[in-house]
Each structure stands twice: as C-alpha cells, then as structure tokens.
Image: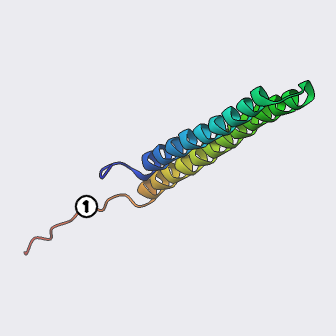
Amino acid sequence: MADADLDVVIRHFAKQQNKGLMAAAKSRRDRYISLAAKAKDRETKERYKQIAKNTMLQGAAAAKRLQISADNAADSYARSMRNAAEAHPAEKTVKKTKT
C-alpha cells in the first residue's frame, strides 16, 4: 500500500471495518438465537428471535452508513487532488541560455 493513493486506502480500511462490524452483528445475533432455543415459553422465544432480527437490521444499517461515509470521503479526497493538480500544473523548468 506504499504507492496506493489515499482514496484507495480509505476504501480498504472501510471494507475491513465493515467486515468486522458485520461479524460482530452476526455473533450477537447467534447469541440471541441460542437464547431463543433455550427459552421455556413461546413468548420469550419470539422476543429473542425478534431481538436477533433487529440486531442484524441495525448492524447492516450501520455498516451501510459506514461504507457510504467512507466512499464520500474517498471521492472527496480524489476530487480535491484532481482539482489541485489542474489548478497548479507542473511548471516546466525553463533554462536560460547565456547570451
């Protein structure tokens, strides 16, 4: 990643965070599903299943917001670098000859 531009790095880190966030949400969901399996009555079982469902919905929404924010930041950085390159083109070195 030494030669990678910063927008690529931003997207890469966001992808890693997204995977971690979804893994944590799935882990929490699985915990509630196991509690639902151990529940004694139907009402408690349904409540745990609903909590598990809501956990995944909230986790997916958070991951989506994280990805959108990272994409916006990466796009903004890339756009600002393009604008900076266009605003200040590389100056050519002009050699003056002695006359």
Q: Horizontally, is 54 left or right of 20 in the view?
A: right
The single residue placed furthest to the left in the displayed view is 99
Mark 1 Cα shell of 10 Å, populated few (<14), some (14-19), many (≥20): few
Q: Horizontally, is 58 left or right of 11 in the view?
A: right
Q: Position of residue 80 (x, y in %)?
A: 51, 55
Work out whether 37 lies above or below 5.
above
Residue under the point 57% across and 41% down: 18
Q: Where is residue 39 in the image (x, y as percent from the top left)?
A: 82, 30
Residue under the point 54% across and 39% down: 19
The single residue placed furthest to the bottom in the displayed view is 98
> Image quarter for residue 8?
top left
Q: Position of residue 7 (x, y in %)?
A: 46, 48
The single residue placed furthest to the right in the displayed view is 43
* Nearer-the-camera pick, 98 or 74: 74
Which residue position holds label 1?
Answer: 92
Residue under the point 61% across and 42% down: 24
Q: What amino acid is found at the position of numbered circle 1 in the picture?
A: Lys
* Nearer-the-camera pick, 31 or 72: 31
